[in-house]
Every structure is written in structure tokens, then in C-alpha cells.
Image (cartoon, rainbow, N blue to C red):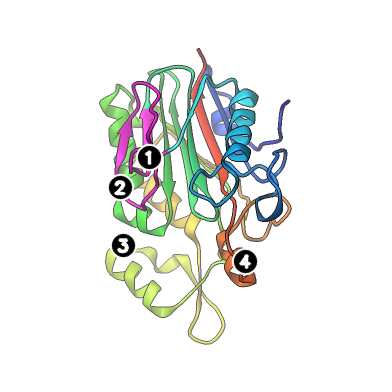
Amino acid sequence: MAIPFSSCPGLAGLRGITHGFFGRQGGVSTGLYDSLNVGVGSGDKPDAIARNRTLVAATLGAEHLLSCYQVHSASVVPVEAPWSERPQADAMVTDRPGIGLCILTADCTPVLFADAEAGVIGAAHAGWKGALGGVLEATVTAMTNLGAERSRIHAAIGPTIGQPSYEVGPEFRDTFMSGSPGSEVLFQPGKGDRFQFDLPGFVRQRLDAVGLGAITDVGHDTCAMEDDYFSNRRRNHRGEADYGRNGSVILLRA
């Protein structure tokens, strides 16, 4: 059974590459996790999560679907074979066909990468901490270690919290002003002393700086698009106990 997903034109046209940004539609989970929750770190029923992940893998034709134990770091794992225990990392790269690299998010930014000519792909979990800490640059470096070239890499920014939905305080802005010069353009004045932060804009800013061949953005706000995506920020607003995870997947076709 195929399930719905979104894609980015920059990756969709690449030979030998398959990718998809999956939201909350088309799965078997219920309640807070209705319905395509692929997050093994959530409180959902393990068998429902496993079934959802099988559906995602089958939809894209992946032999294996791998995710990390994400910790908002800049750590990247080169994938040579499927694993049974998730490593603590926030990005993966591989040149092995059939392995779906799956990033889990619920407002943070998933970024998928591909150099089709080299046959090298990558996937990164870029929340503000990871992006500020260098996870995107580290992913690109890990890809070049496998033979990719920066000028050929296409990056796709997936569904993430949009600026209208992302209210932050002055201390958050100060962190960026000191840690990432030039980031002041990413903050719009909000109510009182609050600001609206452009997380996908920050991700693009970091990607622009490493000289990639192309960058595209699916342009979906996970917090605002309630019927389509899980959102931790929305969960916090409502005081709900937990939340599902969206899956962003890329693989080399066998």
C-alpha cells in the first residue's frame, strides 16, 4: 500500500535517487500518533511504529530504513550496512543502494542531500542547535569523503516549523547573534520582547555558505499544517503528553 508524501524538484529529477517527505497521513497509529508515526523514540505502540516504517520503506522501495538516536549534535554516521541498534548521531551518509536514510522530525528541519553522479547521499536532522553546531557542514564533508563533490550536491529542505509559527525570546536571538554573524535578518519583531525566527532560512544560510550545486525547499510549515504533519511546538501549545514524528527519507536505488 503506497502512502502519501511530498518531494522537492531538485532531488526528484536526479537519476538513481529516490526520496520522500512523509507526514502524518497513511499509517496505522491512533490517538496522539494518528496515523503515520515513524518515531521509535515516541510513546506509541512499537508494533504500530514498525508497521508505519514498513509502509514508508515499501512506498519508496527501500530494503532497509535506518534512523539514528538523534541528540541535536553535529555527529554524522557513514552507513555501510543496516544496524540493529541506533547510533547517537544527527546525520547519515552512504554510497550503498537500497538503504533508506530516515530523519525524524516534529518541527526541526530535515535536509536530504544527493550527488547522483558520485552515487552518494546524506540526510541530516537540523534543529537550531544542530544547525548552529555544524551538522549540515559535517554532512557535506562526510559526503565528500565518500567521493561526492560540493558543486554537484543537491540539498532539499523538508517540512519544518515556519517563521510565523516559531516565537522565541531575546536570549535565543542573542545566542544566534554571537554564534552566527549575519543571522539578524532571520528574526522579525513579534509581540512584546519576542521574535519570530526563520529556522529554514537559517538552514539555507548555512547551506549557501558551503557551495552546493542546488538547494530547494518544500516550503511546508509543520506547526501550521495540522492535518499533514506532527509538531512538537503545537503539542506544547495544547499541553499534550507526546507527539508523533515525521519521516524524511532518501535512498540510492538498487
Rendered location of residue 162, percent (x, y)? 57, 60
| Extent of the magenta region | 68-93
- Determine which residue is flagged by label 1: 91
Mark 1 and mark 2 in contact? Answer it, CB < 8 Å: yes
Query: Mark 3, residues whose alpha carbon is within 10 Å: few (<14), some, or many (≥20)?
Result: some
Rendered location of residue 68, percent (x, y)? 40, 40
Front disc: 3 or 1: 1
Asked whether 227 or 204 is in front, the reply is: 227
What amino acid is labelled 2 in the image? Ala
Rendered location of residue 245, percent (x, y)? 56, 48
> Which badge, 4 or 3, comes first in the chain's sequence?
3
- Determine which residue is flagged by label 2: 74
What amino acid is labelled 4 in the image? Glu
The circle drawn on residue 180 is 3
Mark 3 and mark 2 in contact? Answer it, CB < 8 Å: no
What is the C-alpha distance between the residues marked 3 and 2?
A: 16 Å
What is the C-alpha distance between the residues marked 4 and 3?
A: 33 Å
Identify the secondary structure beneath mark 2: loop
> Which badge, 1 or 2, comes first in the chain's sequence?
2
> Which badge, 1 or 4, comes first in the chain's sequence?
1
Please report the residue visible at 40 percent of the width from the left and 47 percent of the height from the top: 70
The circle drawn on residue 240 is 4
Front disc: 3 or 2: 2
